């Protein structure tokens, strides 16, 4: 069985074919242009391989409710040309195969739970900190959805008393994403984060904001593992800063050994590295295939 996978991002689409064990046979990276340009290349890639099922993990917001008339649509994104774009139905027009559809971060959480840092656990949280901030969660062995998918990057955090930056989010200004995503780092400090590696104050502030969010997620979801990915988290010095701040914020209230004694094993980088999202999309394809062929 050959599975297709799409990790649809605001900057690029990663497309791959592979197997349910996570093996990737071939992949390609397609820039996220206007839909008609990008989708022409996406469809061409899969026409060459003819997979038995396709899994899609997409940037959002997106409609992930299978009972909704707009299921599979990218909805209120600020990305030019993609607002209200029917991503799933455009693929279904060409490929009459089972398809799984979810957010990119939920796909990454699934990949990490099946084959990565949370393998064997029925609960984990995957957070990406890059161009935006988002998180996907596995709870009781199932990807978290409800009224819609979680939008954990847009929670409000307490502003640092020395931070006068107004925030970058086009919807909320100073939500978590507006204060701590890659573009906010660049605008606040005048250069990209990868040029600021030695600037301790940059990462102390970043850790301050990310730790607040993670403390909230621990209190609400109580995940068994938290995985931090995305371009900003390539700055490995962030992990101990975040861990220290999380412990200070929780202040012994969640007095579990994972938090108190082994937090470096609890807050971790992706076991699948940069392949968490595309591997998770393979898993979405496999789940869609098995569901339809029971």
Image: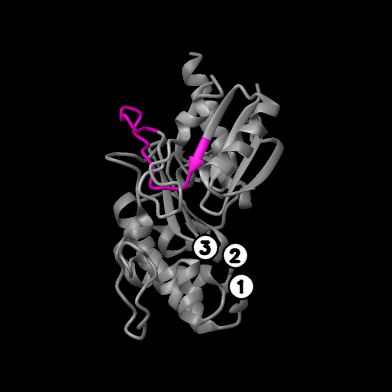
The label on residue 87 is none
Coloured how?
Answer: one colour
Q: Residues within 10 Å of mark 3 (few under 14, many from 20)?
A: some
Residue 2 in the image: above or below residue 148: above
Quarter of the image for residue 137 reads top left
Residue 36 in the image: above or below residue 19: below
Query: Badge 3 is on which residue?
Result: 264
Q: Position of residue 292 (x, y in %)?
A: 48, 17
Residue 278 in the image: above or below residue 258: above
Tell me the distance, in whole angstroms, between the alpha carbons under discs 2 and 3: 16 Å
Q: Position of residue 268 (x, y in %)?
A: 53, 58
Mark 1 falls on what kind of element?
helix
Query: Badge 2 is on which residue?
Result: 234
Residue shown at the point (45%, 79%) measured from the top left: 188
Tell me the distance, in whole angstroms, between the alpha carbons under discs 1 and 2: 9 Å
Residue 37 appearing in the image:
yes
**Residue extending farthest top:** 294
Residue shown at the point (40%, 74%) measured from the top left: 208
Q: Is residue 200 magenta?
A: no
250, 131: nearer the viewer: 131
Residue shown at the point (56%, 50%) measured from the top left: 33
Please state if 268 lies on the left or on the right of 147 as rendered: right
Mark 3 falls on what kind of element?
helix
Residue 194 in the image: above or below residue 80: below
Q: Position of residue 242 (x, y in %)?
A: 46, 69
Q: Which residues are magenta?
A: 56-71
Please state if 234 lies on the left or on the right of 153 as rendered: right
Mark closer to the observer (1, 2): 1
The answer to whether mark 1 and mark 2 are in CB contact below 8 A is: yes
Q: Is residue 66 magenta?
A: yes
């Amino acid at each position: 069985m050959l599975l297709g996978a799409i990790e649809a991002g605001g900057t690029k689409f990663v497309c791959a074919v592979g197997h349910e064990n996570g093996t990737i046979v071939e992949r390609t990276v397609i820039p996220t242009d206007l839909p008609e340009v990008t989708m022409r290349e996406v469809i061409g890639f899969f026409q060459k391989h003819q997979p038995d099922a396709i899994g899609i993990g997409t940037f959002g917001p997106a409609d992930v409710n299978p009972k909704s008339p707009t299921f599979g649509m990218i909805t209120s994104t600020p990305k030019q040309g993609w607002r209200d774009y029917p991503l799933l139905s455009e693929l279904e027009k060409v490929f009459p195969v089972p398809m799984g559809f979810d957010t990119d971060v939920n796909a990454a959480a699934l990949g990490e739970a099946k084959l990565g840092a949370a393998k064997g656990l029925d609960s984990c949280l995957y957070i990406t900190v890059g161009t935006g901030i988002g998180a996907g969660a596995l709870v009781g062995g199932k990807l978290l959805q409800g009224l819609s998918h979680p939008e954990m990057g847009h929670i409000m955090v307490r502003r640092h008393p020395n931070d006068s930056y107004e925030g970058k989010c086009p919807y909320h200004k100073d939500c978590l994403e507006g204060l701590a995503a890659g573009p906010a780092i660049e605008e606040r400090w005048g250069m990209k984060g990868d040029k600021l590696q030695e600037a301790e104050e940059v990462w102390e502030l970043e850790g301050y904001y990310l730790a607040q969010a993670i403390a909230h997620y621990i209190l609400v979801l109580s995940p068994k593992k938290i995985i931090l990915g995305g371009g900003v988290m390539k700055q490995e010095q962030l992990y101990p800063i975040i861990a220290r701040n999380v412990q200070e914020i929780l202040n012994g209230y969640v007095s579990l050994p994972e938090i108190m004694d082994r937090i470096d094993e609890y807050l971790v980088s992706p076991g699948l590295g940069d392949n968490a999202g595309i591997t998770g999309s393979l898993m979405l394809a496999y789940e869609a295939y098995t569901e339809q062929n029971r």
